[in-house]
Amino acid sequence: MNSFIFKTADIKSAREIKSSLKPKPEIFSDIFPDGELKSVAVSASFSLGADGLLAEISVSATLDLQCSRCLKKVEISVQDSFEEFYENPPEEINIENPVREALAMMYPQKPVCLEGCDETFLKKYSAPEERENGVFSELKKINFKKKEK
Ligand SMILES: [Zn+2]
């Protein structure tokens, strides 16, 4: 049985259910094809009100990524919380898709080391631009000197 599935009848009889899941990172390999997802933890709380069923879901994950600044491996922790509301709850509540969507949204576009990292790689690649600026400022200096004389 899929651990992402919760029975509405169970939630109804207990009024409230809290659950912690530790899904295998491999099941999200379609979102993280290079094994970036190191660990994932989901906590879900279901409560039944007069107007429907509320699921409060929290997803936290550790990602093994490459720093976009120094290109070293960097471990990044991400966390997201959200709510799902079911006005007419089905027999079973499957929270796998909401968890997947949350994980996909949590993927940082430009991961960087938490502590300041070595920017020599970045400087090396922005060097041509700096050189151009250098030449331009040299020309400026020459023109200025000529005008003065
Ligand atoms: Zn870095």
Image: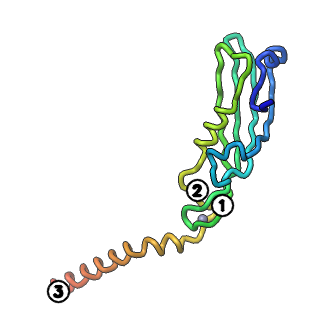
Q: Amino acid at mark 2?
A: Pro
Q: Are marks 3 and 2 in contact (CB under 8 Å)?
A: no
Ranked by sequence position, the earlier of labels 2 and 1 is: 1
Ranked by sequence position, the earlier of labels 1 and 3 is: 1
Which scheme is used to colour this image of the protein?
rainbow
Q: Quick one: label 3, few (<14), some, or many (20+) residues within 10 Å?
A: few
Q: Relative to 26, is 32 on the left or the right?
A: left
Q: In the rendered view, tell whether residue 95 sits above or below residue 102.
A: above
Ranked by sequence position, the earlier of labels 3 and 2 is: 2
Q: Amino acid at mark 1?
A: Val
* SS label for mark 3: helix
Q: In the rendered view, tell whether residue 57 sits above or below residue 78.
A: above
The residue identified by callout 2 is: 111
Q: Relative to 19, is 147 on the left or the right?
A: left
Residue 77, percent across and down?
68, 51
| 3 vs 2, front mark | 2
The residue identified by callout 3 is: 146
Q: What residue lies at 75% left-to-right and 24% top-to-bottom?
A: 46
Instruction: Kindly tell me whether mark 2's CB lies below 8 Å from ligand 1.
Output: no
Residue 134, percent across and down?
34, 79
Residues at marks 3 and 2, CA–CA distance in whole angstroms = 49 Å
Q: What residue lies at 50% left-to-right and 70% top-to-bottom?
A: 122
Q: What residue lies at 54% left-to-right and 51% top-to-bottom?
A: 109
The quadrant of the picture occupied by the C terminus is bottom left
Q: Quick one: label 1, few (<14), some, or many (20+) residues within 10 Å?
A: some
Q: In the rendered view, tell whether residue 51 sits above or below residue 111.
A: above
Residue 74's tag is 1
Q: In the rendered view, tell whether residue 88 sits above or below residue 122.
A: above
